């Protein structure tokens, strides 16, 4: 029980508490707080480093995405150029084929017209002979 006024043992207890507290501070609390402080500093440093690495990774991802978009746009543009060139070449080939077909058709028409003219000329010579022969046979006399 607490006595009022306190006796000398109370002062001894306060003194022992202060001595014990100073010893614990020096031997246990001080080093423990130092270790906790160092751990906190290392943890904060590691967190800052991780954040910096994450920011760098995001920057690299953005740069990679931008480069990829640039390459895609370039490839699309090159593909459009190739398609346009292929279409132009296709039109040129078709135009050449049309002109060749038209030329052959014209040559064939001319050749057929010449053959028809030759055949008609040959028939004109024979028509008179055939007509005389028909008249002679039908009428029974020479025309």
Image (tube, rainbow, N blue to C red):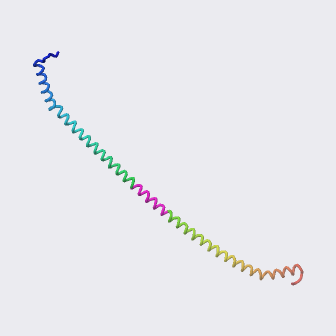
- Above or below, 65 relative to 99: above
Q: What stretch is highlighted in magenta?
A: 67-82
| Residue 7 versus residue 40 in the image, above or below | above
Residue 80 within the segment the image draws in magenta: yes
Rendered image quadrant of residue 29: top left
Which secondary structure is most common in the magenta stretch? helix
Which residue shows up at 60% across the image and 70% down it?
98
Can you give x and y, in whole percent of width and height, for residue 21 in the image?
15, 28
Q: Residue at horizontal 89%, vertical 83%?
A: 141
Q: In this view, does 91 lie to the left or right of 54?
A: right
Instruction: Work out whether 128 lies above or below 20.
Output: below
Q: Where is residue 82 shown, x and y percent of the image?
A: 48, 63
Q: Residue reaching furthest left? A: 8
Within the magenta stretch, is there residue 1? no
Residue lying farthest to the front in this orientation: 5
> Residue 8's quadrant in the figure?
top left
- Where residue 65 sits in the image (x, y, percent)? 39, 53
How far across and how far down the image is residue 44, in percent?
A: 26, 41
Q: Which residue lies furthest to the right in this view?
A: 140
Quarter that holds the C terminus: bottom right
Location of the N terminus by quadrant is top left
Q: Which residue is drawn at 62% across and 73% down?
A: 104
């Amino acid at each position: 029980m607490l006595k009022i006024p306190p006796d000398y043992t109370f002062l001894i207890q306060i003194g022992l508490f202060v001595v014990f507290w100073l010893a614990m501070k020096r031997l246990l609390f001080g080093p423990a707080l130092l270790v906790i402080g160092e751990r906190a500093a290392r943890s904060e440093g590691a967190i800052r480093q991780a954040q910096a690495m994450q920011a760098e990774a995001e920057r690299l991802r953005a740069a990679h995405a931008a480069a990829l978009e640039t390459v895609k746009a370039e490839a699309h543009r090159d593909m459009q150029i190739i398609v346009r060139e292929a279409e132009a070449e296709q039109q040129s080939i078709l135009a050449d084929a049309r002109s060749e077909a038209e030329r052959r058709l014209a040559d064939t028409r001319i050749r057929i017209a010449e053959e028809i003219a030759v055949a008609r000329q040959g028939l004109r010579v024979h028509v008179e002979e055939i007509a005389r022969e028909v008249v002679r046979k039908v009428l029974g006399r020479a025309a």
